[in-house]
Image (tube, rainbow, N blue to C red):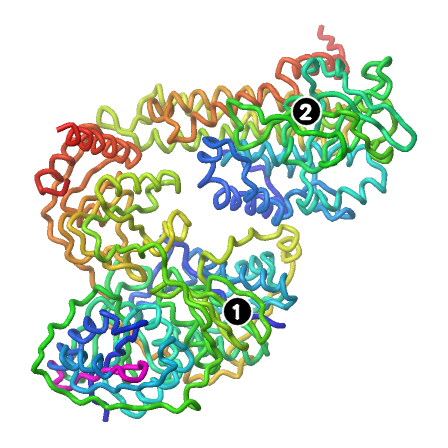
Amino acid sequence: MAEGVAIFAEWAEEGLHPVSLELLSEARLLADELEDKVQAYFLAPPDKETQAEILIRHGADEVFYVFHQCFEDFLDDVASHILAKMIRENSPEILLFPATARGQALAPRVAGYLRLGLTAHCIAFEIRKEDRTLVQIRPSFGENVMARIISLTKPQMATVRPGVFSKAKEDPTRTGRIKKIPLSDEEVKSALHIFKKHPRKAPKVDLAQARVVIAGGRGMGTKEFFAKLYELAELLEGAVGATRPVCHLGWISEEHMIGVSGHTISPKLYLGFGISGAIHHLVGIRNPGLIVAVNKDPEAPLMKKADVAVVGDVREILPLLIRRLKELKGESHEA
Amino acid sequence: MVIDYFLSPEQKLILEVTERIGKEYIAPYALKWDEEETCDPRPLKALALADLFGLFIPKEYGGLGFGTFENCLVIETLSKYCAGVATTFAASGLGAYPILIAGHKGQKEKYLPQIAVGKKLCAFALTEPQAGSDAAAIKTTARKEGDYYVLNGIKQWITNGGVADLYTVIALTDPKKGARGASAFIVEKGDPGFVIGKKEKKMGLRASTTTELFFSNCRIPKERLLGREGMGFIIAMKTLDLSRPGVGAQAVGLAQGALEVALNHARQRVQFGQPVYNFQAVSHTFAEMAMRIEAARALVYSAARFIDSGAKNISAASAMAKAFASDVAMWVTERAVQMMGGFGYMRDFPVEKMMRDAKCLQIYEGTNEIQRNVIARELPKFLKPLEIG
Amino acid sequence: MRFMVCLKPVPEPGTVKVDPKTHTLRRESATLILNPADRYALEAAVELKEKVGAEVTAVMMGPPNAIPLLKEAYACGADNIYLLSDRAFAGSDTLATSYVLSLAVQKLGPFDLIFCGKVSIDGETAQVGPELAAWLNWPSVIWVKDIRPAQNGFEVVRLTDEGEEELEVRPPALFTIEPEINDPRPPSIKRLLEMLTREVPTLTAEDLDADPSHLGLEGSPTRVLDVFTPTYEEKKEILEGPAEEVVEKLVSILKERGLI
C-alpha cells in the first residue's frame, strides 16, 4: 500500500538547495489533505545530519538520509539507481522533484527505471480526494491553455521549478524520524567521473530575484534590436528576460528564458516588448507588481493581462522610452 | 513573387536551402555587418557547407553542375537578406568563371574542386585606377621570364580583395598591342610580390570587402596563364557576359526585400486613423514597385535561361538584365524609404541600407551607361529590316 | 564508433491542432519542423564523427510526413536515417516514446553514444533523453556543452546550476546537448538532391518487436484530464496614440508608482 508524500531534497555543493524547502511546503499541504506523512529523500555526504534536521523542522516527518562520500558530486547513474531502489521499497504515493539541473537529470531516470508517469514543470497541484489522485497542472502542449494531468502509476511523479512555491516556515519544535542509510563503495560505482568544477564567474542571471524585469519576444524583430533591451535594463537597474522563441532564435542565451522551462519571476515591474504572451511565458510571471506590455496587437494575451497596455510599434516606443529615461537621469544628476 | 516560373524540384530545393541560409545565417546580422563593415565568415561557411559555391561548377570537378539561372536564383535570394553577402558570393563566382571558360584540364582539376567546396574563395581583377569604364586602358604588365611571369601594377576596387584565395588577374603580356596584348592569370594569395591594399570605405554593400591589389615583381609559374597570351580581354568580356545577369538577380532580390519590408510597414502603420496602405498615393506606389520588380525578374530569368541554352550572342541580353534590374532596384529602394517616411530613414530599419546597396549595382561590373553602349553596339546584329506596305 | 541521434518532429509554432478528446497533439495536421534543439545534437554527433571517425544514425519517431526532416538530417551529415512509425505509437507520452527509442537502439545498435536535444519546443519536458538512458540502463549526462575524445571514452563539459563540470564518461552513454555547443550547419544540397528519389526505411512496432502494452496511449501512464483557460482580471490602462505621447504617459505612470 502506497503511502507518503515524498520529495527529493537536493544536496547542492555545500548545503540544502533552497528549493527543497519550497517542495516541503507544498508536500506538507498535500499530505495534510491526504492525512498522510511527508517524506524526504536526502542523498548527501556523511555527517550532514544537521541538514536532515532542517528538513524535519520545515515539515518533513521522515527523512531518508542516504550517505556516502560520493555524494559530494552529482553522479546521475548512482543517484538514480539508489533513489529508484528506495522508492521501490517505500512506495510513496507522491514524489516531487525540483526542476533544477540535478532534479531534471534525476527524475526522468527514476521514472524510466520504475516505468512511472512523470509530469514536468508543474505550476500547481490539486488532490482528487475520492481516489487520492494528484492532479498536476501545467501549460498544455501547443495550446494556450492549462492542462490538468494525472498519473496512472504510483508514486505520482512531478517536477517543479524553483520559485513556484513559497518556502516552508521553520518550526523549531517539530520532530520527526531520520533514517540513516550508509552505502557501500560497491553500491556507488559510476560510469561518470567528475574531475573539475568551474563555479560560474559572473553571477547567474538572477531573474528570480530581480526587482525589474525587461523582457522581449519575437516582435523585437532582430537580435540587434533585442539588444536595446539591455540599455533599458541598465537605466531601470533590471534584468533582461526573454520568451522561448527568442532564446531559440539565438538572440539571447536560454539562461534568460522566462516561463515553463525557464525562470519564474516575481518583479515589482515587468516590461514586456513585442511579446504576444503565450501561456508558456505567462506562467513564469508570479505575483508581479506592475505589468507593462508594448505590442502592436491590442488583442495579444499579454496585452490583456497587462496593467498598462501600450498599443504601438516597439521600434518606435522603445527608443523613445530609452531617450526619455536618459533625459530624466540627466535631470536628476543636474539637480 | 507574383508570377510562377515553374521551377524544377531541384531548383525549388536550391531555393529552399538558400532561403534558410538567408533567414538563419544572414537576416539577424545584416544591419550589424553593414554598420561595422565586416565580411563575416559565418554565412560564407554556411554557403560552403550547403554546396552553393559549387553551384555552377561541373559535377566532374565536385560541383553541382547547374547554370546561370540557378546562380541567379541563389544570388536573388541572398540579396533579399543582404546584398553585401550576396556580393561576396557572386564575386567569388565571377572570379571562378575565367577558370571555367579558359582553364585547361590541369588548371580545372587543380582549382575547381577547392572552389566548389568553398575552401578557396575567388576574386576577379580587371579595374585599375586609370581603367574603369575604359577597361582597355589597363597598365598592369606580365613579363615572361623563363618558366615564370612577373606581374607589375595596381588593381583597384577589387571585390573580395584579401578575403579571396584565388585572383584572376588581367594583365598585359604585350603592352604594345593594348587590349589585344592582355592575358588572364591565376594569382594565389601569398604569391611573392602580391600585396593586398587598404580596404575601401563604401556607401553600401558594406558586408563585402573591396580593396586595391598591388603587384610588384610578383613571380608566378607560367602554368598560371589562362588560355593563351593575348586572350585576356576576350576572357574578361566573356566572364562579364556570364556574370551580369547575376547582378540583375542581385537587384531583383534587393528590390523584393525592400518591397516586403516597406509593404509590411505600410499595412501596419496607422495615420489619420487607418493603415497608410489605404491611401492611394501609397498603394499605387507599391503597385508600381511590384510591377517593375516583376518585369526586372522576368528579364533576368529570361537572360539567364538564354545563356544556359548555349546561345552565343548573349552580351546584349546580359547587359539588359543588369542595367534594367539595377535601375529598378535603385528606384524601388528609394521609394521604399519614402513609403516608410522617418522609419525608412533610420538605420534601425533595413531599407536605407538597401537604398545604399542598390546604388552600387548601377555602377559595378560595368556602369549602366556602359551597359547601354553594349546594348547599342549589339543591336544591329539582331536587326532585320522591317518592311511594311 | 557508432553514434545515434534522436530527432523529434515538432509542429511549427502556430500551426498546431490538438485532439479535443485526448488533448494530445494532432501531428498530422501541423507543418512539421525539426525540433530546434535537436539540430545541435545532430551537429554535435556529426562534428564528433568528423573528429574521431564514426557512423551517425539518426532516428525519428513520427508520422510519415516527417520523412523530409530525416532527409534533412541526412543532408546535415547523418549516415543512416530511420523513421519509427506506427499507428500504435500515437498518443505516446515520454515513457512510451523512450521505450520505442530503446527498441530502436537494440535493433540498430550497438551504439557507443546517443545524442538528444536538450528539450523539445512542444512538450518541453526534457525527459525523453534520461528516460531512454534508464530503459537501456546507460549513464546519461544532460546539458552537455563540449565533448572531447579521451583515453577511456570521452571528456564532456556539462552545465550545472552552479556553473560547469568536466566529466570523464565511459561509453555507452547518452548526452542531451546544450545549444551553445556548436553552430548547426545548413543541409548540403548535394545530399538533399541524392535524397530526392530515395526511400527512407521505416520501422514499425512489429519490426521493433515492441510489447503493445508499452505503446501509445495505453503504454503512457500520464493522462490529460482536461484543459482550462486561466482568466485575468481586467484592470488595465490602455495607452494609444502618437508614440511620443504614449511614452510620456508611461513614464509618468512609472514615476507615480515609484518605479523610476
Residue at 21% in and 88% down? A178
Answer whether residue A41 is magenta in the image. yes
Residue farthest along the top direction in this orientation = B389
Where is residue C235? Give x, y as percent: 9, 47
Quarter residue B193 falls in: top right
Q: Mark 1: which secondary structure? A: strand
Quadrant of the drawing holding the C terminus of chain B? top right
Task: Say if B43 sits above or below C45 in the image.
Answer: above
Which segment did they paint magenta? A33-48
- Spatial CA distance of label 1 from label 2 is 57 Å
Q: Would residue B17 be found to the left or right of residue A199 on screen?
A: right
Where is residue B361? Give x, y as percent: 57, 23
Quarter residue C32 falls in: bottom left
Q: Is residue B113 visible?
A: yes
Task: Say if A247 sits above or below A167 in the image.
Answer: above
Q: Mark 1 belongs to which subunit?
A: C
Badge 1: residue crowd in 10 Å (few <14, some 14–19, many ≥20): many
Q: What's the mark number on residue B318?
A: 2
Q: Is residue C119 visible?
A: no
Residue farthest along the right direction in this orientation = B146
Q: Would residue C166 be found to the left or right of residue B73 on screen?
A: left
Q: Nearer the viewer, residue C253 or B298?
A: C253
Q: Amino acid at mark 2?
A: Ser
Answer whether residue C55 is magenta in the image. no
Where is residue A192? Give x, y as percent: 47, 77
Q: Would residue B388 be found to the left or right of residue A235 on screen?
A: right
Residue at 26% in and 71% down? A17
In contact (CB < 8 Å): disc 1 and disc 2: no
The residue at which mark 1 appears reads as C155
Q: Amino acid at mark 1?
A: Glu
